Image: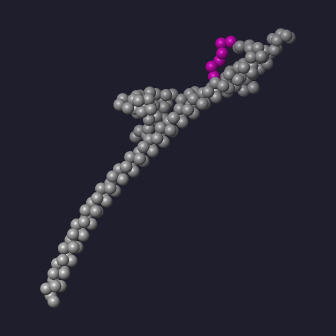
Amino acid sequence: MQKGLIKKTKKGFEHTQPLNKIGYDTETINVTWKPLLPRPPISSSSIRLSPMTSTTNSFTLETPPDTCTPISTTKVNSNLMPILLEAAAEAALRDKRQERMVKNRAAAYESRKRKREQAERLTAENEEMKERIINLEVKIAELTRENERYKRIFAEKEGKGE
């Protein structure tokens, strides 16, 4: 059973319904999104200061053993260290923000879908109640006419009986 526009599969997120927001009301779009892979964390233990010369300060950035190993160890000027760390942090935040945005869109779509389904249920229930009211009004009118007829018959019998 398909739950909504964006559903989570083993391959990632799958988009299987028309996108009303963009105007594709009549065609179905199938797009597969894969969740963003987390970046390996950069910890202070993976940064090792190595003296190059007495005039420059530099450090070596090593990757953790579980990730791919670099071809060569890069020696970076220590002035670039804050910039690299800031860039890595910004990239991680951007990735998290992107993933959060995708999840938020999926949740918003599900919420709109539930709201639309609830409105459709209430509309159907409203129509059913209106039909019931009409049927009951017809029944009341029939019973009122029948009651009037019985009153006349009873009044005639009362008048003849005296």
SS assignment for the magenta stretch, majority: loop
Side of 111 relative to 148 (left or right): right
Q: Measured from the top left, where is residue 93 in percent x and y?
A: 64, 28
- Relative to 92, residue 159 above or below: below
Residue occupying image coordinates x 55% and y 32%? 101
- Relative to 125, residue 46 above or below: above
* Number of numbered labels in the structure image: 0
Of residues 155 and 2, the one drawn nearer to the viewer in this rendering: 155
Q: Is residue 3 magenta?
A: no
Q: Measured from the top left, where is residue 160 in percent x and y?
A: 13, 85
Q: Point out the image quarter for the C terminus.
A: bottom left
Q: Point out the image quarter for the N terminus.
A: top left
Please identify the quarter of the rendering in which residue 145 is found. bottom left
Please indicate, yes or no, whether residue 64 appears anywhere in the rendered image. Answer: no
Q: Measured from the top left, where is residue 39 in percent x and y?
A: 63, 26
- Relative to 17, residue 79 above or below: above
Residue occupying image coordinates x 77% and y 20%? 48
Q: How is the image coloured?
A: one colour
Outermost residue on the right side: it is 54
Q: Is residue 70 magenta?
A: yes
Residue occupying image coordinates x 68% and y 12%? 72
Of residues 26 and 148, the one drawn nearer to the viewer in this rendering: 148
- Relative to 105, residue 42 above or below: above
Residue occupying image coordinates x 78% and y 17%? 78
Of residues 4 and 21, the one drawn nearer to the viewer in this rendering: 21
Q: Measured from the top left, where is residue 113 in percent x and y?
A: 44, 41
Please indicate, yes or no, whether residue 52 appears anywhere in the rendered image. Answer: yes
Of residues 136 and 4, the one drawn nearer to the viewer in this rendering: 136
Q: Give the residues drawn in magenta, as a range.
A: 66-72
Outermost residue on the bottom side: it is 162
